[in-house]
Amino acid sequence: MRHPLRFGLKLSGQDTTIHALRAVWRIAEESGFDHVWDFDHLASIGDVGPDRPIYEGWTLQAAMAEATKRVRIGCLVSGNTYRNPALLAKMAVTVDHLSGGRLEFGIGAAWAEIEHKMYGFEGLDHRVGRLSESLQIIKSLFTEERTNFEGRYYRMKDAIANPKPIQKPYPPFWIGASGPTTLRLVARHADVWNIAGGDPARVAELTAMFEESCAAVGRNPSEIRRSIQFGWDGQDRNELLELSARYVELGVTEHVIYLRAVEPKATSEHPEAIAEKIAELLPELRRLERVRSSL
């Protein structure tokens, strides 16, 4: 199965401003990008520590829905342990309706230990099992009149979830995964595999594991689109084009370019400026479709 080559921008919501977020959403909308993204953390991540400013990802997606009309929107990726699956399903349907059916539903097992400790979230020690149950529940809530589920971690009894998503049967599931057990969940449930890993050598390694997982559950791996997020500092245009071309060669068709936050003493450009530069290069990025044709 051949999937279209698509490009998106991501500004996480960490160490940024509402003005910058709106600017990136506008650039994505007006410049012809296919999708625009944030992330899902409640405390800042990375070397900066947990006390940097950060906005909540699903609230931002609702704002994205209202600020744009065409571009698809999503979160790479929602942390499953932060919310009950019924709550997450209801939030997703709300954003799908607000956007007129433009939601890309990103979800993963969650990993940030400090958030679970600070806020008292449970489940990090059984995060894959919880994700497995949540995926089953959410799909049922999206499609069935009543959901009954008796699992190890979640229970639903005659659960009603109306309205249903605009997109049928539901918004595309983007599942972030890099380990053997989570890759099995990708093989069973995903429309898009979000590859957790950056350099091409790692992508090639994970792709082999992904294809083995698909074989194990009896699914054709070509049915599942492959996505990756990667950064660019706005300096060498050839660096961006060559990296994206390498991912195309590896079968990745969903490219999300991550506009990382600018540190107070950093010399790199602000996210909006980099987004504008990527927009200028978007026609050249789209011509990478020729790379696929020659494979």
Image (cartoon, grey):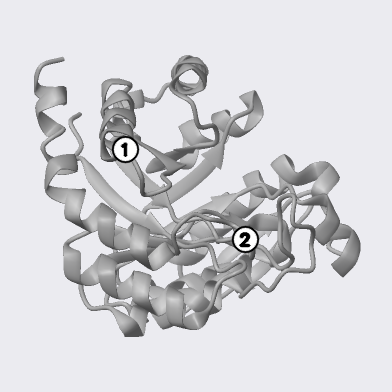
Vertical comparison of 113 with 263: above or below: above
Vertical comparison of 25 with 234: above or below: below
Tell me the number on the disc at residue 128: none
What is the distance, in whole Å, between disc 1 and disc 2 at their CAs? 22 Å
- Left/right placement of residue 221 relative to residue 238 reads right
Place of residue 52 in the rendered image (x, y in percent of width and height, measured from the top left): 72, 69
Q: Residue at x 26, y 33 (%)?
A: 238
Residue 168 in view: no
Front position in the image: 37 or 93: 37
Front position in the image: 275 or 158: 275
Q: Residues within 10 Å of mark 2 (few under 14, many from 20)?
A: few
Place of residue 181 in the rendered image (x, y in percent of width and height, measured from the top left): 65, 28
Q: Secondary structure at mark 2?
A: loop
Looking at the rendered structure, the kind of residue marked 2 is Glu
Q: Quadrant of residue 150?
A: bottom right
Q: Residues within 10 Å of mark 1 (few under 14, many from 20)?
A: many
Q: Does the CB distance between marks 1 and 2 fall below 8 Å? A: no
Front position in the image: 188 or 15: 15
Q: Secondary structure at mark 1?
A: helix
Q: Which residue is mark 2?
A: 263
Tell me the number on the disc at residue 240: 1
Q: Residue at x 47, y 62 (%)?
A: 11
- Left/right placement of residue 173 relative to residue 8 reads right
- Left/right placement of residue 223 relative to residue 105 reads left
Residue 21 in view: yes
Q: Residue at x 12, y 48 (%)?
A: 283
Sequence-wise, which precedes: disc 1 or disc 2?
Answer: 1
Place of residue 178 in the rendered image (x, y in percent of width and height, measured from the top left): 59, 30
Quadrant where the N terminus lies? top left
Vertical comparison of 167 with 288: above or below: below
Vertical comparison of 26 with 178: above or below: below
Looking at the rendered structure, the kind of residue marked 1 is Leu
